Image: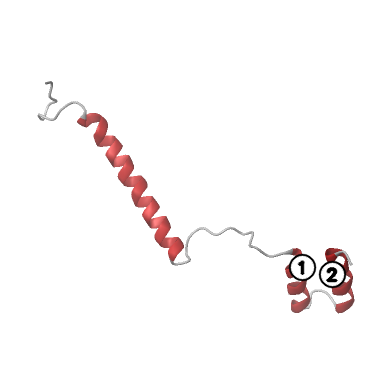
Amino acid sequence: MMYGWDGAPWYGMIFGPLMMIGFVVLTVLIIAWALRAFGLGWQSDASDTTPLDTLKHRFARGEIDRAEFEERKKVLTGS
């Protein structure tokens, strides 16, 4: 059996770097999971709001008046 300079088998040169890459990937995944568990991770900008929800928020903030709200609501709901 062929051994390297320090007496380790040759396949240690393959599995060593693979183990290190696996360790780094596992560490990153654990950190990402922990951040998301505490609500600090990556969050998409597009939330699950509908156009009608956006219209209601604009009306509540005073960006549009009641007439414009009702008109746009009719367009969005189709009635």
Disc 1: which residue:
52
> Is 54 rendered above or below residue 62?
above
Q: How many numbered discs sit on the rendered protein?
A: 2
Residue 74: quarter of image = bottom right
Residue 23: quarter of image = top left
Question: What residue type is disc 1 on?
Answer: Leu
Q: Which circle's residue, 1 or 2, is located before the other in the chain?
A: 1
Question: What residue type is disc 2 on?
Answer: Lys
Q: Residue at x 47, y 64 (%)?
A: 40
Q: Secondary structure at mark 2?
A: helix
Report whether 78 appears left or right of 9: right
Residue 56: quarter of image = bottom right
Q: Position of residue 48 (x, y in %)?
A: 65, 63
Which part of the image, by quadrant, shows the N terminus? Answer: top left
Residues marked 1 and 2 touching at CB (< 8 Å): yes
Categorize mark 2 by other alpha carbons within 10 Å: few (<14), some (14-19), many (20+): some
Separation of residues labelled 1 and 2 (CA atoms):
7 Å
Disc 2: which residue:
73
Q: Residue at x 42, y 58 (%)?
A: 33
Report whether 12 appears left or right of 75: left
Q: Position of residue 60 (x, y in %)?
A: 75, 78
Report whether 52 appears left or right of 5: right
